[in-house]
Image (cartoon, rainbow, N blue to C red):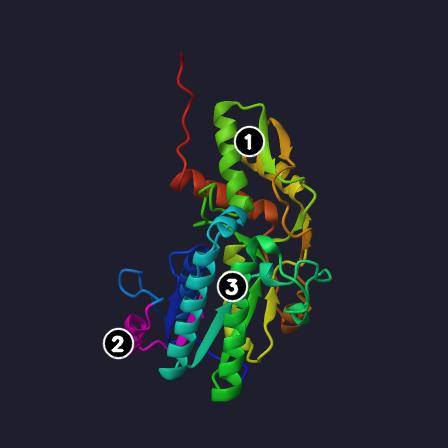
């Protein structure tokens, strides 16, 4: 299949357009001179094949970015394993099958770096998938995502569908989920640091030891990279997308505190899980294709914090007694 694919003048469906990744894709696609298709859950429940089939017949997407998923942090995965596994299995299975049946020209499935084995060699290489036990705190989500990636590969082999899979690293940015009960580490720390600043709290609580190493990518960089891959990549193996650099959670918390303006100390709750000890992507395949992320971690965090203050939080002075 040709590796060159144009989005210009195409009907491009961003499944999951209200999420962190989907909204960034919608922003980025404005420069591609294509027609962006979206559908709310009220319009089509992706877990319901009949609804999806009807929507596909009517909308006729030519390209699909599969960004729809149930996502969340350690707490959400641990307390709702059935929701995470069932919803993600059904969403991915239905979309891939419908895309194949309705003649979609190209589909990109999004995985997540958390689906690699817990103790996979670092940096994480694409070939490490399914070579060892998963991280227990998110195994339900991981199994569903692995099945989705393999389903794309199976449709490619059996039906000749140009379906590809990309594996993003940890993401953050405008539109993130800042709910402390279901959010990932960056938005959670931003919300907690902002609250601690307003309360003049002496310390900011950070889950875990602070020693776990993580890689973080600004979501608008991801959107640019995904469009690059959609246009330039056409093969069965999944491909990592990230920055290729990591840092300890303790350093991340200190950087977020500085960006937010919180001047207190960090207090680590060692009774909370760290998750996988280290997670950083090997991005050599992506780099060889000619793409790399442009936004520094500080710049991305500053943009994310501004969005949080403007859209979620309300800067206010403490009440005077």
Q: Where residue 59 appears, x then y in whole percent? A: 29, 74
Q: Where residue 176 appears, x then y in whole percent? A: 46, 49
Q: Identify the residue at horizontal 43%, vertical 63% (top origin).
A: 86
Badge 3 is on which residue? Answer: 224
CA gap, disc 1 and disc 2: 50 Å
Give the answer, above or below, for where 70 lies relative to 2.
above
298 to the left or right of 318: right
For the residue carrying disc 3, how many other residues have a C-alpha within 10 Å: few (<14), some (14-19), or many (20+)? many
Give the answer, above or below, for where 97 lies relative to 298.
below
Comes first in the chain, label 1 or label 3: 3
Is residue 79 at least partly visible in the picture?
A: yes
Q: Where residue 62 appears, x then y in whole percent? A: 38, 78
Residue 63 inside the magenta-drawn segment: yes
Badge 1 is on which residue? Answer: 261
82 and 125: which one is in front? Answer: 82
| Disc number lying in front (1 or 2) | 2
- Which dot marks residue 206? none
Residue 138 inside the magenta-drawn segment: no
For the residue carrying disc 1, how many other residues have a C-alpha within 10 Å: few (<14), some (14-19), or many (20+)? some
Q: Identify the residue at horizontal 55%, vertical 76% (top origin).
A: 232
- The residue segment tinted magenta is 48-68
212 and 252: which one is in front? Answer: 212
Which quadrant of the view contains residue 294?
bottom right
Q: Quadrant of the C terminus?
A: top left
| Disc number lying in front (2 or 3) | 2
Give the answer, above or below, for where 123 lies relative to 180.
below
212 to the left or right of 59: right
149 to the left or right of 285: left
For the residue carrying disc 2, how many other residues have a C-alpha within 10 Å: few (<14), some (14-19), or many (20+)? few
Badge 2 is on which residue? Answer: 58
CA gap, disc 1 and disc 3: 30 Å
């Amino acid at each position: 299949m040709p590796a060159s694919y144009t989005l210009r003048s195409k009907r491009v469906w961003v499944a999951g357009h209200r999420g962190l990744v989907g909204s960034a894709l919608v922003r980025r696609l404005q420069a591609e001179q294509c027609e962006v298709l979206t559908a709310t859950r009220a319009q089509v429940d992706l877990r319901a094949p009949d609804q999806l089939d009807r929507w596909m017949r009517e909308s006729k997407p030519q390209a699909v970015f599969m960004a729809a998923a149930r996502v969340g942090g350690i707490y959400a995965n641990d307390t709702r394993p059935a929701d995470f596994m069932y919803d993600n299995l059904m969403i991915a299975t239905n979309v891939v099958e419908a895309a194949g049946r309705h003649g979609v020209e190209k589909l990109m499935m999004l995985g997540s770096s958390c689906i690699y084995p817990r103790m996979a060699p670092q940096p994480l290489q694409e070939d490490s998938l399914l070579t060892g036990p998963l991280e227990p705190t998110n195994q339900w989500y991981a199994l569903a995502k692995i099945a989705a990636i393999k389903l794309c590969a199976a449709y490619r082999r059996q039906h000749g569908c140009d379906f590809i899979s990309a594996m993003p690293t940890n993401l953050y940015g405008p539109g993130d989920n800042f709910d402390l009960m279901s959010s990932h580490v960056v938005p959670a720390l931003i919300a907690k640091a902002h609250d601690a600043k307003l309360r003049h709290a002496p310390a900011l609580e950070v889950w875990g030891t602070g020693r776990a190493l993580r890689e973080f990518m600004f979501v608008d960089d991801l959107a640019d990279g995904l469009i690059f891959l959609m246009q330039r990549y056409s093969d069965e193996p999944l491909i990592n997308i990230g920055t290729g650099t990591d840092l300890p959670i303790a350093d991340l918390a200190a950087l977020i505190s500085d960006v937010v303006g919180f001047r207190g100390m960090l207090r680590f709750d060692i009774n909370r899980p760290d998750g996988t000890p280290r997670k950083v992507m090997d991005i050599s395949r992506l780099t060889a294709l000619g793409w790399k992320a442009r936004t520094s971690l500080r710049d991305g965090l500053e943009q994310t914090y501004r969005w949080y203050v403007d859209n979620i939080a309300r800067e206010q002075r403490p009440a005077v007694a």
